[in-house]
Image (cartoon, rainbow, N blue to C red):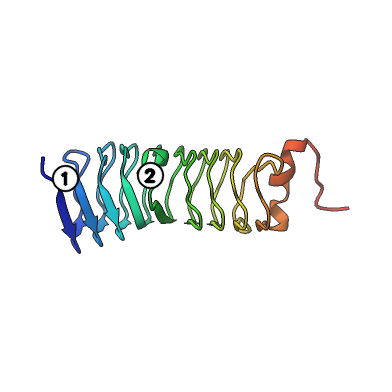
């Protein structure tokens, strides 16, 4: 099948789960309220694209390239970002649900996660240097050998990060988030005297 080059196109309410987009490059395209759930997005390059209100849950991302892509109000459950083409991998997430997804061994420095659900997300061996977690729920997210240097988690909640098993130099946390850094030590922190 011949690869396509699609530029500056808007896709509204398309069901790509039934008929996946053609393989090729999508440059500066908008996908509004589209269904990509269980779709095979392998070997597709998305560059400077905007996904708004889309469902990408369980989509296959084998060698999928996301370069400067924004996801807004998207449902993205169970995605394996480590399967993506890692060259130039860059995206931002706003008001997204990424529960049960994996960023295992990805290098996604300076990524912004804003007002997103990151429940049980795997960040093992991930480079998140300079990333921002703004008002995110990180319940049971896995941070193991993760680089979080200069990352900002001040407004996020429910994280558990072991400082001995992760790189946290100059990372920013709020005072209320301190228990999430100490819970591995099985100590009790009282807020009052």
The residue under label 2 is 76
Q: Crowdedness of circle 1 by 10 Å Cα count: few (<14), some, many (20+)?
A: some
What residue sits 40% from the left and 42% below the top?
81
Indicate the position of residue 26 as horizontal and vertical percent values: 22, 55
Q: Secondary structure at mark 2?
A: loop
Name the image quarter holding residue 60: top left
Indicate the position of residue 129 as horizontal and vertical percent values: 56, 54
Vertical arrangement, residue 162 with respect to residue 115, above or below? above
Quadrant containing the N terminus is: top left
Name the image quarter holding residue 85: top left
Indicate the position of residue 21 as horizontal and vertical percent values: 18, 45
Indicate the position of residue 187 as horizontal and vertical percent values: 80, 39
Label 1 and label 2: CA atoms lie apart by: 20 Å
What residue sits 31% from the left and 44% below the top?
64
Vertical arrangement, residue 145 with respect to residue 117, above or below? above
Pick the residue in front: 157 or 29.
29
Q: Inspect this view and state whether residue 134 appears.
A: no
The residue under label 1 is 22
Q: Inspect this view and state whether residue 119 appears.
A: yes
**Relative horizontal placement of residue 163, taking residue 11 as reference (left or right):** right
């Amino acid at each position: 099948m011949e690869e396509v080059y699609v530029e500056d196109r808007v896709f509204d309410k398309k069901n790509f789960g039934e008929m996946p987009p053609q393989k090729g490059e999508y440059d500066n395209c908008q996908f509004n309220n589209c269904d990509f759930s269980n779709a095979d997005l392998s070997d597709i390059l998305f560059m400077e694209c905007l996904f708004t209100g889309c469902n990408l849950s369980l989509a296959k991302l084998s060698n999928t390239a996301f370069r400067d892509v924004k996801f807004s109000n998207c449902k993205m459950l169970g995605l394996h970002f480590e399967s993506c083409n890692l060259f130039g991998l860059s995206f931002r997430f706003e008001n997204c649900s990424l529960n049960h997804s994996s960023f295992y061994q990805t290098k996604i420095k300076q990524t912004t996660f804003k007002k997103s659900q990151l429940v049980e997300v795997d960040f093992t061996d991930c480079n998140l240097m300079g990333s921002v977690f703004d008002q995110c729920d990180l319940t049971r997210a896995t941070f193991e050998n993760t680089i979080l240097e200069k990352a900002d988690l001040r407004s996020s909640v429910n994280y558990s990060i072991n400082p001995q098993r992760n790189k946290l130099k100059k990372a920013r946390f709020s005072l209320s988030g301190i228990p999430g850094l100490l819970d591995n030590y099985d100590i009790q922190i009282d807020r009052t005297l």
